[in-house]
């Protein structure tokens, strides 16, 4: 029986054919850009594809260089964190310890105040701040006012950051202990306002 009553010939289905259309140019450009970005990302953050290297480090050497190897290293690295992050000393004294012209901040690298045999005066400076003219390495600076950190930093943090600046940028001086900071904090508890150089020069370095 004919299933197509109105036609003697049933409709013929067309055979599928494969096309030869080209991929759009923008697709190649997008793939190339993604590949370029991916290679750059891996180069910067892959750490040589080492599972032990991760941000912010870019290589195993960077990671190893920043790991403490002794008690002194631990204090130094803690002080570095205070310098750069907690107290943000870096904003005025700069990453190289050379100070800045605006605001007028004296250098810490090679400073006789930083490198004094006993740290009594520099502890006072961090605790209570400093203002007015000051001579550092033969150059005169007119400090607009280093703020006091006695209410912001602990004895340990002050000891750590002073140890850091006394041993960074080629400086070579002894570490500072929290006990030294605590002792001077107690002696100067009645100090109000920032210190001036003439006040500091009256203080025995050992006190």
Image (spheres, rainbow, N blue to C red):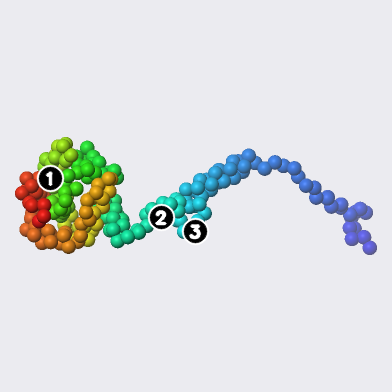
Determine which residue is flagged by label 1.
131
Percent x, y for residue 4? 89, 58
Q: Secondary structure at mark 2?
A: helix
Whole-Å distance between the Cαs marked 1 and 3? Answer: 49 Å
Nearer to the camera, 162 or 13:
162
Nearer to the camera, 184 or 1:
184
Q: Nearer the viewer, mark 1 or mark 3?
A: 3
**Image quadrant assignment for residue 144:** top left
Whole-Å distance between the Cαs marked 1 and 2? Answer: 40 Å
Determine which residue is flagged by label 3.
51
Label 1: how many residues lie within 10 Å, few (<14), some (14-19) or many (20+)?
A: some
Whole-Å distance between the Cαs marked 2 and 3? Answer: 14 Å
Q: Are marks 1 and 2 in contact (CB under 8 Å)?
A: no
Nearer to the camera, 15 or 114:
114
Q: Are marks 2 and 3 in contact (CB under 8 Å)?
A: no
Determine which residue is flagged by label 2.
64
**Image quadrant assignment for residue 30:** top right
């Amino acid at each position: 029986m004919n299933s197509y009553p109105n036609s003697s010939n049933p409709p013929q289905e067309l055979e599928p054919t494969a096309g030869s259309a080209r991929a759009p140019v923008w697709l190649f450009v997008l793939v190339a850009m993604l590949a370029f970005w991916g290679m750059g990302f891996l180069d910067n953050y892959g750490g040589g594809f080492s599972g032990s290297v991760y941000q912010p480090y870019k290589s195993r050497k960077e990671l190893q260089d920043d790991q403490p190897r002794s008690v002194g290293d631990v204090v130094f690295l803690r002080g570095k964190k205070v310098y750069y992050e907690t107290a943000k000393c870096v904003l005025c004294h700069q990453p190289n310890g050379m100070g800045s012209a605006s605001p007028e901040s004296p250098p810490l690298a090679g400073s006789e105040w930083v490198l004094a045999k006993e740290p009594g005066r520099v502890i006072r400076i961090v605790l209570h701040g400093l203002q007015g003219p000051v001579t550092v390495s033969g150059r005169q600076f007119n400090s607009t006012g280093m703020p006091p950190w006695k209410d912001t930093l602990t004895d340990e943090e002050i000891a750590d950051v002073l140890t850091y600046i006394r041993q960074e940028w080629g400086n070579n001086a002894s570490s500072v202990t929290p006990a030294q900071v605590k002792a001077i904090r107690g002696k100067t508890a009645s100090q109000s306002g920032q210190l001036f150089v003439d006040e500091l020069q009256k203080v025995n370095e050992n006190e």
